[in-house]
Image (cartoon, rainbow, N blue to C red):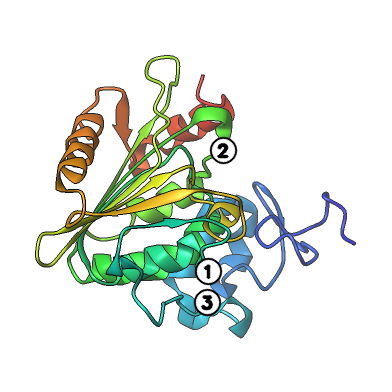
Amino acid sequence: MLSCSNACIICGEREGTISTMDGPVCAECIHPDQIPKASTLTKSRIIVYARAHQDGMRPRLAKAPKQYLETPVRSRSRAITQGSGITLAEALNDIISTSEGIDIAVSFIKMSGLNLIIDCLRDAAEEGKAIRVMTTAYMGATEYEAVAELADLPNAEVRMELNSDMSRFHAKCFLFTSKDGKGTAFIGSANISKSALTEGEEWVAMIREEDLPETMEDLRSAYERLWSSPYLEKVTKSNRARIERAIERRGV
């Protein structure tokens, strides 16, 4: 078993033989073009560059297969739990693939979870569909490389609460609008992490607008109010240092 000191900081599975600003990485997780300047690079820059240049990566870093359901989850309002027979990642990918508008609000976002839905989100963004994401620096759980990757998608905007003492934003909501203007919402306990989207004991209610139109309207209004909050800051390349400091301070 690798010790924490020499494990690759990206995959955590192989020995890190290449030094970077944030720690060692293995040759499988860094694009060959970046190896000569690795000592000047951060973990987030390595990950974002690798994803943008997939063709030059080794087969080990090829995209994971997308998760789709044989029977669309949106056929009825339902609860998604450990006993429901589907994962939240599967349900979200199924909805993302047919949505025109995608609005997400979660307390934290980790690469382990984002990797499960990023391909569908990227496809949607490249098709011109609007994506809005809100998250926080609370408890230092959000990973900068995750919000940076989302903010880098076309037609996407990410806003982040950097000081939880000012406004305690703890919502977990995924709102989708289909081509016919109908909405679907996922409300529950799940943030964007691998555990929450797969095997974790999260309880999430999927609500269809056809079943509860007034509830859907309430959720849209709540999202717009939070989106306009003065306590949220847009994630851009220029404020990276400020965001990373907020994460290090755990949002306080």
Above or below, 95 relative to 215? below
Residue depicted at 80% across the width and 64% down the height: 15
Give the SS element for disc 3: loop
> If you read the primary sequence from the N terminus, does the residue marked by circle 3 or circle 1 appear first?
3
Task: Name the mark nearer the viewer: 2 or 1.
Answer: 1
User: How far apart are labels 2 and 1 at the CA level?
Assistant: 28 Å
Residue depicted at 56% across the width and 24% down the height: 249
**Where in the figure is residue 230, as x and y percent of width and height?**
25, 22
For the residue carrying disc 3, how many other residues have a C-alpha within 10 Å: few (<14), some (14-19), or many (20+)?
A: few
**Disc 2 and disc 1 in contact, CB within 8 angstroms:** no
For the residue carrying disc 1, how many other residues have a C-alpha within 10 Å: few (<14), some (14-19), or many (20+)?
A: few
Q: Looking at the rendered structure, which numbered label has been put on residue 64?
A: 3
The image quadrant where one finds the N terminus is bottom right
Question: Foreground residue, 139 or 30?
Answer: 139
> If you read the primary sequence from the N terminus, does the residue marked by circle 2 or circle 1 appear first?
1
Above or below, 125 relative to 63? above
Task: Name the mark nearer the viewer: 3 or 1.
Answer: 1
The residue tagged 2 is 141
Q: Looking at the rendered structure, which numbered label has been put on residue 56?
A: none
- Say what amino acid the circle numbered 2 marks: Ala
Residue depicted at 20% across the width and 49% down the height: 212
Residue 83 is left or right of residue 189, and the answer is: right
- Say what amino acid the circle numbered 1 marks: Gly
Give the SS element for disc 2: loop
The residue tagged 1 is 85
User: How far apart are labels 3 and 1 at the CA level?
Assistant: 21 Å
**Where in the figure is residue 204, as x and y percent of width and height?**
44, 50
Give the SS element for disc 1: loop
User: How far apart are labels 2 and 3 at the CA level?
Assistant: 24 Å
Residue 5 is left or right of residue 163, and the answer is: right
